[in-house]
Amino acid sequence: MNTNTVVRIAISGDSRVGKTSLCLRLVNKELPLTYVTTIGLDLEVKFSPKHGLKIHYWDLSGNRRYEPLSVFYLKNINILFVMLVYSLEDSDSVIRISEIYSNYKDVSPSKKFIVVGTHNDSQNQHTSGRDFAEKEGLPHFLVDSKNNKGIDLLEQYILYIHSQSISEPPKTESLRRICIENPCLDTNKRDNCIIS
C-alpha cells in the first residue's frame, strides 16, 4: 500500500449533528445502532493508494468543554481542511458553526473550510447553512449519512482540492459540477475565497 502523504481533516460542529456518522461513512464503515457521544476526539483513517494518500479524519467533540483541545489541534497540527458540520434539522447548529469558524480562522487563518449539512433526508430543512457558506465564500455540501448520499461527492472534492491545481480543469463531470456550484473554485473569484 503506497501512501506517501498524510492528509488531516478535522470534522467540527455542535453535538448531535452527525459528525461521527459522516466520519464513519467517509472511511466506508457502517453506522452504529445507538448514539455514542464523542469525548475529545476520535480518529478514523482511510487509505487511498490510488492517490498515494492516508487520510486522517479527526472527529472533534461537539461539547463546548472540549473546544480548547480542538483549537489546540487546529493551531498545532497540519490539518488541511476543517469541515464545519451542521444539521438541516436544527438551525441553531448553524449559529454554532459560525462561532467555531470565527474561533478557528483567528487561530489558524491558513486552514481551508468546508460547510457540510447533514440529515439531507429530513422533511424540515432550513437554508441558513447554505446562506452562511455563501456569506463566507465557503464550499457547501449536503449529505445524508444514514442513506450514504452525497458522501462520494464530498470525498471527490477533498481529493480534487488536495491533488489538483485550482486552475487545472476538473477531470470528471461530477468535479466539473462541484466547480460550477462553488464560486470559490472560479479562478477569477478565488482571491476573495478561503480556498485558493
Image: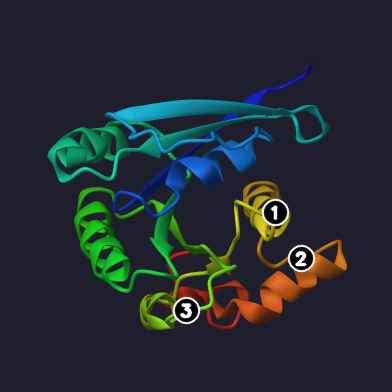
Q: Is residue 185 above or below residue 53?
A: below
Mark 2 lies on a secondary structure that is: helix
Q: Is residue 162 left or right of residue 164?
A: left
Q: Nearer the viewer, mark 3 or mark 1?
A: 3
Q: Quadrant of residue 48?
A: top right
Q: Is the residue marked by circle 3 packed among few (<14), some (14-19), or many (20+) residues within 10 Å?
A: some
Q: Image quarter for residue 147?
A: bottom right
The residue carrying mark 1 is 160
- Upstream in sequence: badge 3 or badge 2: 3
Q: Amino acid at mark 1?
A: Tyr
Task: Identify the secondary structure beneath mark 1.
Answer: helix
* Residue 58 figure quarter: top left
Residue at which label 3 appears: 125
Secondary structure beneath disc 3? loop
Please tell me which residue is depicted at 36% across the width and 76% down the height of the picture: 136
Residue 84 shows in this picture: yes
